[in-house]
Structure formats: structure tokens, C-alpha cells
Image: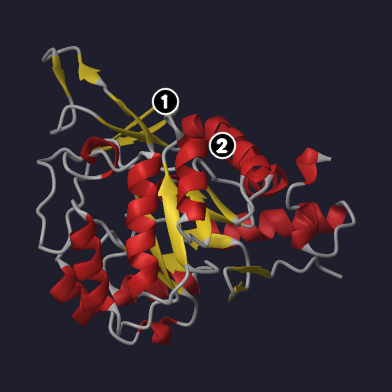
Amino acid sequence: MPANLETTITGLKLNNPTILASGVLGVTKASLKNVINNGAGAVTTKSISLEPRSGHKAPIIITYEAGMLNAVGYSNQGAVKAAEEFANSAEVGAPVIGSVIGQSVDDFIKVISKIKNCGFSAIEVPLSCPHTPGYGTLGGQHTPEMAKKITDAIKKISKLPLWIKVSPNENMIAVAKAAEAGGADAIVAGNSMGPGMIIDIKTAKPILGFGMGGVSGPALRPIAVRCVYDLYKAIKIPIIGCGGITYGRDLIEMMMAGATAVAVGTAVYYRGVSVFKKITEEAEQFLTENNYKDITQIIGLAHG
């Protein structure tokens, strides 16, 4: 009998532990539904800001032999249009997580107030973007003080589960603990790392339009696994592992480190939108062959 892949995180029941990461295919409700039809257990919207943003100038993404660099710059339609696009999100057939960004505490509050009737199942707040001035690490948000302040403020105005996305770069444990103290319901670990840079040696200039970008993909996976492993020992709230998950074995590894679910992003580039179905089928095969009846049996297994 095949192993059971269902998992529950912050009260949300997922058919399997894979979640579409923010920033990938999360622009429209139709694109989210397409991802769910291709096997994802839940999906996350592209990050929503108060006002529309055009983002960084192109090129915004480049691949290299070990992964990908991106500097998209949070391009999005703004909160008003997002509220229209993602209205009745429950229709897509699986939990939809609304990703929210801001340059100030007040920004977060205003965005959440505008999207509160979309039917989102949870709110994700990335405090950790490494390449957009005014936001995340470049906006001074990835500190214990700001993490608690932002978390506190959001929990006062929203009853939805709140997921705080942290950086693998620095202060991760302290920021996660502060978010937990502020009432966060889960931690997403982690965001892209860096920033990094790739230079075109023919033109002697950085390739990305912003010059530098966040590192994601397979190169990030061992660091993300270590982040989840460390967080599992440090906090009591659940963890969504994020970073380089491309194959079923990567999902298994991340959950053994302590993740309850995993976010998949860059792997869509490598294996197509059906990567969610492929990852879960590969994970199910491993579990069945190794006599695990339920995927939740492996959560934190690497800790003995």
C-alpha cells in the first residue's frame, strides 16, 4: 500500500507537503490553479506590495552551473489589483498563501487590509529578500526587533496563520525566535541567499540588470537543510523548508531535518510545472520501499 503523503501545517491540511514558493507562477489565480493541477499541495502568490512595482530592469534571472541568480525586484500589480485577481481564492482547490511585503509596518497592515477578503488560507511575510532596496535585508527588516514588531502588528489585525520567511545569511535563529515570540505560526526557511554576482567576461559587466541577485536552486540546498535542522532545535512552531528542492530525495532530506512541508520554486525551471507531481511520486516511492506508512513519520528523523 502506498505511503500517505498528507500533512497538516498551521491547521491547513495538504494532500502532500509541496508548496509553490512565492515569486514563481503566482501572478494569477489561473496560474495557481495550474500548479495545483500539476500536483502541488498548496500555492503561494507572488509577493504583493501596497503600490504597483515594475521591479528591476532586465535581465532579472540567470542560471549557472550550480543554480540560479534572480533580482526580480518584487514586480507586482499592487494590493488593489491583487485583491481583484485573487478574489475567491478557495476556488483553486488547495490552500492559497498570500505573500505580503512592505517597507514599513504600516505598509504590511494596509496591504493585508486590502486583501483580507481574498480567501487566503495563510499570510507569508518575507523579511529576507537580499536584492531589493527598502525590503527584507536591504530594508533592515531581518532583525529580531523588526521581526517581532512586524509580527506583533500583523497578528493584531489578522486571524490567518502567519508564516515568516527568514534569510539563510545571518541572524536566522534570533529572527525566527523573535517572530515566534511575536505570535508567528510558522517559519519559512529560507529565502534566496546572497546576493551573488555573475560577470560577463566579454563585456566586463555584471549580467543582471541590478548587478547582483539572490542565489537559489541546487547550490542552496545544503545550506537550507542546515537552516531547517538548526531551527527545528531552536523553535517550537513548524517549519516550511525552502531552497533547492528538485527531487523526491530532497523533500525527504528536508523533512528529516525538521520541515513539516517544503516550498518549491527554482525546480520549476529545471523540471517544468509538473515538478510537484514528480517530487511527490519520487518521495512516495522512497517511503513505500523503506516501509514508512506516513510521511509525517520522517519529520525531524535526522535528530534521532
The quadrant where residue 109 appears: bottom left
How crowded is the residue under tag 1: few (<14 C-alpha within 10 Å), some, or many (20+)?
few
Position of the N terminus by quadrant: bottom right
> Residues under labels 1 and 2: Cα distance?
23 Å
Above or below, 8 relative to 124: below
Q: Amino acid at mark 2?
A: Cys
Above or below, 55 relative to 185: above
Q: Which residue in the structure is indicated by mark 2?
A: 227
Q: Is residue 261 left or right of residue 191?
A: right
Q: Position of residue 25 (x, y in %)?
A: 33, 61
Q: Which residue in the structure is indicated by mark 1?
A: 65
Q: Is residue 26 left or right of residue 235?
A: left
How crowded is the residue under tag 2: few (<14 C-alpha within 10 Å), some, or many (20+)?
many
Q: Amino acid at mark 1?
A: Glu
Tell which tag, 1 or 2, sits nearer the viewer.
Answer: 2
The residue depicted at 48 percent of the width and 82 percent of the height is 93
The quadrant where residue 107 appears: bottom left
Q: Position of residue 208 (x, y in %)?
A: 18, 31
Which residue of the protein is positioned furthest toward the right in this rendering?
291
Coloration of the structure image: secondary structure
The residue depicted at 32 percent of the width and 76 percent of the height is 30
The quadrant where residue 295 appears: bottom right
Above or below, 219 relative to 260: above
